[in-house]
Image (tube, helix red, strand yellow):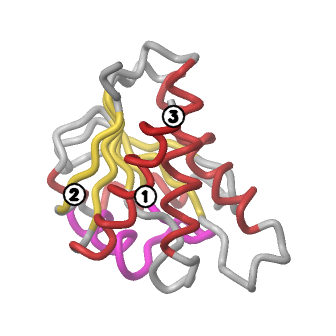
Amino acid sequence: MKTRIEIVQGDITKQHVDAIANAANTSLLGGGGVDGAIHRAAGPELLAECRTLNGCRTGEAKITKGYRLPAKYVLHTPGPIWYGGQHHEEELLASCYLSCLCLASEHGCKTVAFPSISTGVYHFPLDKAAKIAVGTIAVYLDSHPEIELVRMVCFDARTKSYYDEALSALECDA
């Protein structure tokens, strides 16, 4: 079985896909890290559209146009802050990926790129985050053939190694 998940190291703002996910904050009005990079690359029109969305709850997602990005859409999802795992962080992170994929399907997207949600300033443990992301994406793809490819875009080699490991473990279990 050829997997429809690929892991790459790179810049999510340069991905030529139908939709990219943004590891947003709940205001959706931009921030640091991936969120800031996406807002800068998309241009001021993205912020203007985000202002009309009235924020977004952690684990949910909202969609906007991609504006100056090579992607047609941006899927904004606020990931959970890691508080030691006792505050439903794992379920909320899985919900981020699932919510984005559902929106992508609803909007006819065939290709989606994700960053590693919540593993930067929100301190979600990278090993747990990679397993949750890859597992949630794989389960969704099993019943949604309309999405042809999901690409995990990792900022650095260390992050990529965790996602590679999670994908290898999943393929061994299949």
| Tag nearer the camera, 3 or 2 | 3
Residue placed at 76% from the left, 76% from the top? Answer: 85
Q: Which residue is mark 2?
A: 13
Q: Which residue is mark 1?
A: 22
Number of on-image labels: 3
Task: Label 1: state its secondary structure.
Answer: strand
Q: CA distance from mark 2 to mark 1?
A: 10 Å
In magenta stretch: residue 36: yes
Determine contact: label 3, label 1, CB under 8 Å: no
Residue 30: image x %, image y %?
A: 44, 72
Quadrant containing the N terminus in the rendered view: top left
Which of 129 and 59 lies nearest the eye of the viewer?
129
Residue placed at 54% from the left, 21% from the top? Answer: 142
Q: CA distance from mark 3 to mark 1?
A: 19 Å
The kind of residue on which mark 3 rests is: Ala
The kind of residue on which mark 1 rests is: Asn
Residue placed at 58% from the left, 67% from the top? Answer: 128
Compared with 163, 25 (above or below) is below
Name the residue at the front extreme. 172
Q: CA distance from mark 3 to mark 2?
A: 23 Å
| Tag nearer the camera, 3 or 1 | 3
The numbered mark, 3 or 2, whose residue comes first in the sequence reads: 2
Compared with 129, 109 (above or below) is above
Q: Which residue is mark 3?
A: 138
Task: Label 3: state its secondary structure.
Answer: helix
The region drawn magenta spans 22-41
Task: Label 2: state its secondary structure.
Answer: helix
